[in-house]
Amino acid sequence: MIERRFILFIIASGLAAVANFGSRIALSQLMSYVPAIVLAYLVGMATAFMLNRAYVFKDADKPLASQVMWFIAVNALALLQTLIVSLLFSHYIFPWMGLTFHPETLAHALGVIAPAVVSYFGHKHFTFRKS
């Protein structure tokens, strides 16, 4: 059975992903693909932290500084996953498949989705765990 908290996490993550994805599209008008992904990830990360702290893991009692530190650590690994998946699909898999319809956008969408489960357990057991 799926834990209620996981469902709330997916909803919060979905909203953060929309912030991430939308800001990447806007930032791509101003800079190249990789820097836009990184900056957009920071927008999504800030959104995710606020939503998770307020709605998903509201019973966490660790100090805010500790939560922020762990949130950054877990998300640094997720950013690496996002970059690897995005670049793998946009530079190798989609060209190999002959996909030419917005390959960077589709690759970034897959990259944003990729770390969802790993991030949930990282935040549950490290970022927002009860002391």
Image (tube, rainbow, N blue to C red):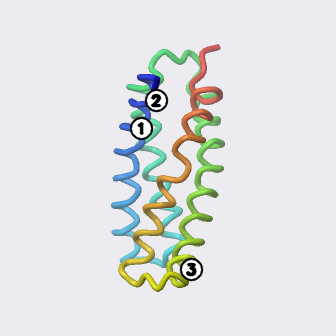
Q: Amino acid at mark 3?
A: His
Q: Which residue is mark 2?
A: 6
Please tell me which residue is depicted at 54% across the width and 35% down the height of the picture: 120
Q: Is residue 65 visible?
A: no
What quarter of the picture does the C terminus occupy?
top right
Q: Which mark is residue 91?
A: 3
Q: Does 60 appear above or below 67? A: above
**Residue 80 percent location from the top left of the image:** 64, 58
**Marks 1/3: CA–CA distance:** 28 Å
Q: What's the amino acid at mark 1? A: Ile
Residue 30 on image: x %, y %: 40, 77
Name the residue carrying label 1.
10
Marks 3 and 2: in contact by CB < 8 Å? no
Q: Specify the quadrant of the image occupied by residue 102.
A: bottom left
Q: Amino acid at mark 2?
A: Phe
Residue 98 appearing in the image: yes
Residue drawn where x is 43% and y is 26% of the image: 56
Q: Are marks 2 and 1 in contact (CB under 8 Å)?
A: yes
What's the distance in space between the residues labelled 2 and 3, CA to CA? Answer: 32 Å
Q: Identify the secondary structure beneath mark 3.
A: helix
Residue 35 horizontal/vertical position (percent): 53, 70
Binning the other alpha carbons within 10 Å of mark 3 as few (below 14), some (14 to 19) or many (20 upward) gives: some
**Residue 106 % position (x, y):** 41, 69
Would residue 56 be found to the left or right of residue 61 on screen?
Answer: left
Mark closer to the chain start, 2 or 3: 2
Element class at badge 1: helix
